[in-house]
Image (tube, helix red, strand yellow):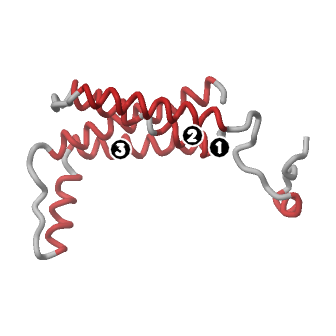
Amino acid sequence: MTLQVFGLIWLTLIVLSFGQILIKMGIGKQKIPVSANPFRTVWNIIKVMLRPKTAAGLGMYVAGTFIWLSVLSRVNLSVAFPMFSMGYFLVVLLSATILHERVDWRFAVIGLILISIGVTFIGQSSPKNSRAYRIPAGAAAAYNVEPAGAK
């Protein structure tokens, strides 16, 4: 994995994590009313989605998705997605600092360390210099690309 791809993964995590914080800020402390009428419930959700902070958070999710597409075009999903779990670390930190949510750091730190160790092991299990997607030799001609294993 190149430094550029690593940076794109972290940019995705940052954008999506701040999007999550904005969505939570937009929702506020109120519960979204759930009605016996499903259309009323959907309408209540749409009203919350149209709040400025919620809409900004959803917009950040869209932007993060575009960055994530760029990541997936450069690296194997089996490497990129486990790194995505580092977003847990970021969201816990942002929730505590921006939203002032109570976090029991004794347990949070242990959990985050275990996640980091797991992500490291998964990253090390990926073969070096592998392509993000390999097309079988028989199908390569149809796609006008090199077959898997070709130099």
Count how many numbered circles sit on residues in the image. 3
Pointer 1: what residue? 76
Are discs 2 and 1 less than 8 Å apart at CB?
A: yes
Look at the picture and state if 2 lies above or below 22.
above
Measured along the vertical axis of the image, is residue 43 above or below residue 6? below
What is the quadrant of residue 23 in the picture?
Answer: top left
Point out the image quarter for the N terminus: top right
Q: Which residue is drawn at 32% across and 34% down?
A: 91
Residue under numbered circle 3 = 59
Q: Which mark is residue 127?
A: none
Residue at coordinates 88% horizontally, 58% vertically from top-left? 137
Q: In the drawing, does residue 8 fall left or right of residue 150?
A: left
**What is the three-letter code of the residue carrying label 3?**
Gly
Q: What residue type is labelled 1?
A: Asn
Return the disc, 2 or 3, that comes first in the chain's sequence.
3
Q: What element carries label 3?
A: helix
Residue 66 placed where, x, y %? 51, 43
Helix, strand or loop at disc 2? helix
Q: How crowded is mark 1: few (under 14 residues within 10 Å), some or many (20 or more)?
A: some
- Residue farthest along the bottom direction in this orientation: 37
Quadrant hosting residue 18? top left
Q: Nearer the viewer, residue 11 or 90?
A: 90
